Image (cartoon, helix red, strand yellow):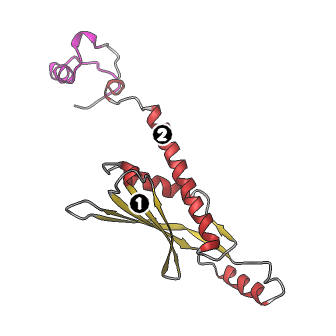
Amino acid sequence: MVATGSLSSKNPASISELVDHGFHPGSLLNDFDYWDYVVPEPNLNEVVFEETTCQSLVKMLENCLSKSKHTKLGCSRVLVPEKLTQRIAQDVLRLSSTEPCGLRGCVMHVNLEIENVCKKLDRIVCDSSVVPTFELTLVFKQENCSWTSFRDFFFSRGRFSSGLRRTLILSSGFRLVKKKLYSLIGTTVIEEC
């Protein structure tokens, strides 16, 4: 059946199809929008919950980078492209939406790729009370800027080296690898963004 903005013909086939879906012929109006009855209203509680979950995930990723800059990366600053953690959080939510426990069943390994070498930064368990059903491996990438290397080289040799430490600039690209833990098929999904 093709849906249109109004139901002008009262063709018996169309009406019987609507009746099969729970509509009664007596309740049909002349100018009736089919999509008002077929498409469900968006659940605002679900939208708010997803936005809250996304923001919480963004905060976890930012905290991971903040903790790692001194302990594992040995730098004073990490520059993150605008909306990068937001994009990652949305992709993580999308990949977890098909899982039985959703995001609660996720364990995320956060890495940084520097010159084709992956450095482990952190392991984030979304809900420790739930047995993990899948793993995500997030790989941040370093921005390849020649001027930052030159600047770090220049300042490390001069009188400014005592107060200035390295600044790490992240690329807007990242990689997410999803591995199902309890699947007979053993599905692995790799997304490069």
In front here: 31 or 96? Answer: 96
Q: Position of residue 142 (x, y in %)?
A: 57, 74
Dot 1 amino acid type: Val
Asked whether residue 76 appears in the rendered view, the answer is: yes
Residue lying furthest front: 129
Q: Badge 2 is on which residue?
A: 49
Image: magenta residue range: 4-28
- Whether residue 16 is in magenta: the answer is yes
Q: Could you give the CA–CA distance between mark 1 and mark 2, rounded to whole angstroms? A: 20 Å
Q: Badge 1 is on which residue?
A: 107
Asked whether residue 80 appears in the rendered view, the answer is: no
SS at mark 1 in the image: strand
Residue shown at the point (61%, 66%) measured from the top left:
67
Q: Which mark is residue 38?
A: none
Residue shown at the point (28%, 18%) measured from the top left:
8
Q: Position of residue 153 (x, y in %)?
A: 72, 87
Is 54 situated left or right of 184 in this image? Answer: right
Up-down: is 149 above or below 173? below
Residue shown at the point (36%, 29%) measured from the top left:
40
Sort mark 1 into few (<14), some (14-19) or many (20+) by Cα contacts within 10 Å: many
In front here: 130 or 159? Answer: 130
- Whether residue 102 is in magenta: the answer is no
Up-down: is 171 above or below 4? below
User: Which quadrant of the figure has residue 143?
Assistant: bottom right
